[in-house]
Image (spheres, rainbow, N blue to C red):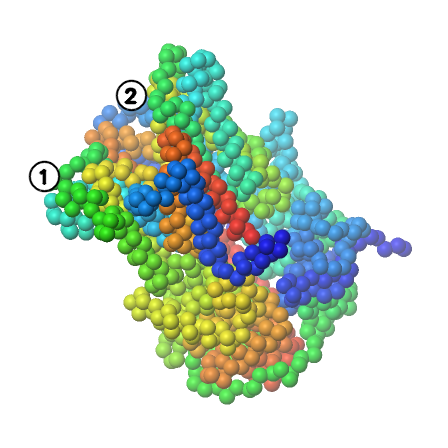
Amino acid sequence: MRELALYREWRQRRTADTQRIFTTLLVMVALMALAAVLSRGVFLKPQNLLNLIFQNAILGVVSFGQLLVILSAGIDLSVGSVVGLSTVLLMIFQFLGLPAALLLTVSIPALIGAVNGYFVARRRLPAFVVTLAMMLFVYSLAQVISGGAGIYSGLNGAPLSPLLVSFNRKGVLGVPLPAIVWLVVLAGVALFVRLRLGHFLFAVGGNERAAFLSGVPVTLVRFLAYVLAAVLASIGGVLAVARVGEGHPAAGQTYLLDSIAAVTIGGASLSGGEGTIIGTLMGVLMLGTLNNIMNLLNVSPMMQPAVKGTVILVAVYLNSRRERG
Amino acid sequence: MPSDRRWRSVLAGLNDYSAALVLICLLGYGALRVPNFLSEMNLSAILYQYSIIGLLALGQLLVVLTAGIDLSQGALLALTSITTALVMVKHGPVLGTLAGLTLPTCVGVMSGLLVSRLRMPSFLVTLGTMGVARGMAMQIANARPVPIHHEAFIAFGSGTFLHIPISAFVWVVACVAVHFFLTRRAFGRHVYAVGSSEESSRLSGVKVAAVKLTVYVLSAFLCAVGGVIWTSRLGSGSPVGGQNYELESIAAVVVGGASLFGGKGRVDGVFAGVLIFGVINSVLNLSGISPFWQGMIKGAVVLLAVALTQIRARAEAQATVGMADA
Amino acid sequence: MSVPVPLLELRNVSKAFSGVEVLHDVSFDLRAGEVHCVVGENGAGKSTLIKIISGAYSADSGRIAYFGRDVHHADPRWARGHGISTIYQEIDLVPALNVAENICLGNEPRTRGGNVDRAAMRRLAERLLDEIGVSLDLDASAGSLTVAHQQMVAIARTLSVNSRVLLLDEPTAVFTGTEVEALFRIVRRLKDQGLGIIYISHHLEEIFQIGDRITVMRDGRVTRTGPVQEFDRTSLVRAMVGRDIDFSRQSQAATPGEELLRVEGLTRRGVFRDISFSLRRGEVVGVAGLVGSGRTEVARAIFGVDRFDSGVLLVRGVEQRFRSPRHALSRGLGMLPENRKEEGLVQSRPVLENAAYSSVQLQSRLGFVPWARIRRTVRQVIEDVGVRCASTNLNVRSLSGGNQQKVVIVKWLAARSDILVLDEPTRGVDVGAREEIYALMRKFKADGKAILMISSDLPELLTQADRILVMAKGRIVGEMPRDEASEEAVLGLALETRREGHRAQ
């Protein structure tokens, strides 16, 4: 029991953030150990680990966006639809050449994020309902543009840009490009959180009133979070096109639940103000590892949502227990 | 002052019935500008399509009144469907229906316990049960639909009586029942109390945990009823359907004037809310507008409804403050 | 003739929060059929007393007896179930339900079928309203009633659970004269029925009208208890104050410099009216007043949190109308909110981060934050101010109340605000930290800053402020330099008499 007392004392002296990261790390390591055991070591091979990152790059990028919004004590239910819309937009705009197409693919979702941000930050409507409405809106918009089906080539039959086609196969120093993109986004988000507005996310989500009274531009910070979430979702969409070579309105469906799961498992609190980038990163990797484990255990793909659902419940329960002391 | 009070109650009444007013306007628009709108076939079709969402929306209303949310409705629909079909194949329609009604309700019990006893946020709990229910449905069906061959059962879902779809009757009966519950039973009145001020309700002796548990169970049950009807229409049990139905039910509840913060909302509002979406759907279809535009219109309508709710709430708050000084 | 058992009896009850004693050796009793008023300045311990009686807090020591029986672990539900009801200022009826339903909430009469027996419920509600002599539209939704009517419904509700003790905590704060009369009628009827009523108010004239006995509290102790006939206004005020003030702790007199802030005719309809004063470099201006006098609202209007309708605010001679605290911050203002836990700090974030928010906002250029410089400055200020924490990386939550308060001060110091508004700077802070905060204030003065200090602590005002403004009912009712001030003078001005009609019109 003395160990427990010492541990408690050590815990007291670390910030909640460090504690949270530590706990999440433990769980992640445990999960990976399980995967390693079940796969007789194959899991831990560098190639497989790289693959893990590669497979989850899209979710990773989208989850960072969701993290920013959740930190501000909000939620973005439209990320899945935005991913889908982005895939459609990218395909459509092929004929303009890749750079222009990319620009449009990211800017239009940025506008969507701005609408979300306006209603949530400025008009103070509940984020849940606003982003829910936007989700329906964007999905249907994507359907209207794409005619409801998938798009396999650009307007006027313009072919997919060769860079996109070979995107997944290329790499830098053996690291596949999607993983690099994820890394760059990680760096970007980490930088953002050190800038003024990004830094204030925690304050705004943690205690909006106190932040406001301290001179923090609360509305602007919140607004920005939604814009960035949409932008990151659109980047995820670009990666999705690179992966499957098609644009489809429903391409992003799974990312909504998964991004919320990743962020929550990574230790962020849905009531805002608490969470870390590393935590979300680990959350994504844990989801990926979980998928691996389920495959190794031959859990049928049907049950997988059920398992994920249970995992979320357990994670939230543990989180809430920890917060209560 | 008496005239002030009368004015205020008129305003309040308008607020409560705003969904109905919107519906009437839409019906008017449809009648005047859209060919074939008022045809029996069309009106019947609207009721046919939206009576299932209507059942879900009733359940959602109950949950929302306690300041919660039920995201598992679509998954429960699918679970009902597959359970009903599988049991029916071996044991006939009666047992099939019973099984289909029971299993999802049990899931509702689980959600309710997690929210009421473990105090977990309903958003996350029902997100989790959504995954679990969907997974269960897929698993026991092996991701394949299960065809049904009982003629009577299939006829039930698509049947009509006096040219009105049977499912619409079921919905109306359910509306009456829920309305009765919310207005005549003390327990139903307590739903409003719990949604408004949980702590003070507890102090007054309201059984808060029991109320919260009940609304999730009722929501699940209503989903199950809807699921049975849905199954009979499809003629098979489907594990994949019902995607995003819960979002439609939330939309209908919000448009119907309920507050997501709890304590405010009525059955007649939800009834109108559901029909609003039904009418919009119909108007768009008959006007030849691509179905893909529906989502955009729905999204815009929900946004507008919520924005209006907020404006109303602020106006009401200011009105009462003003009165304190009068 | 034997004295009947009191409904309620407290003997030698004490209570402390985080080492700060809020009640010391308090004895109190309530008899059936009496209105027992409790008076005292802010922070005297009245609310804590009520919370202990209603079961929301437990006493650290002493005896508590309800209806003659000792009780050890009261909780609110137990208390309510045993007939002790409290009416707070924040009334929580269920807006969607009507008057009758709110009154009978939790005790609805049922028909044989199990439904609510609407007729019986209405009869019950009507009878209860009758008992208190009020007539209301039973079908009106609770959300549409005036505050006064809501309170009446709340009172009727307590009758539906057979209350025997009613606690009224500042019930008339937002009432007009007629509404107060209506409340008095209700109180008298309840008295006649044998209920015991505890009535907390700082409206002295109400106390003389309705009270049977008065208990005066000061600094967590009871200074005097007795029948109302034994008091008059002067003796009542004297019982509320009259402590020995240690003038050795007094701050130096100010030699004020240029005028940093001035308000003229500041008005916000229904909240405060015609506020005018100025603040100069190197001076501390104290603002005295009781709950509801509008001090915090004025501060918030100056700081850009709330708006004001008319009047002029001048900062360094330039007219301003701050749209947000951010705006006020950029012009050199800072505000320590009254409620530091909820409004001053983000509890879940580290000390260093909290202390740096305002600096980060001010010193960032194009989004880039000079972290090294800010950290250095903030750490230095933390040390200067004497915040005690094991590490600045710890969450603010883990600090004591006094230290948390200091962190908020650090925030504004580090941001180099030179006009500081302090709203109850030492509330809930222990004696040691209190002295340190006073020392800090003296340093601010010496550095040429200007301080507006809102305080309910009379000794604090008398020893730390150079000038004292007294507010009551949204207006400034007095201004006096330190050497002319006394506790009785200040309190006497603050205890306003109610005028018929509107507040602050």
Report whether A102 appears left or right of C102: left
The residue identified by callout 2 is: B41
**Which residue of the protein is positioned furthest toward the right in this rendering?**
C1
| Residue at image location 33% in from the left, 22% down from the top | B44
| Residue at image location 74% in from the left, 52% down from the top | C72
Report whether B37 appears left or right of A41: left
Report whether A68 appears left or right of C163: left
Vertical placement of B42 versus A222: above or below?
above
C207 or B84: nearer the viewer: B84
Given the image, on which type of amino acid does mark 1 rest? Asn
| Residue at image location 64% in from the left, 38% down from the top | C107
Label 2, label 1: how far apart the Cα atoms are? 41 Å
Q: Position of residue B140 (x, y in %)?
A: 41, 24
Circle 2 SS class: helix
A158 or B176: nearer the viewer: A158
- Is the same chain shared between marks 2 and 1? no
The residue identified by callout 1 is: A156
Categorize mark 1 by other alpha carbons within 10 Å: few (<14), some (14-19), many (20+).
Answer: few
Q: Quadrant of the N terminus of chain C?
A: bottom right
Report whether B122 appears left or right of B52: right
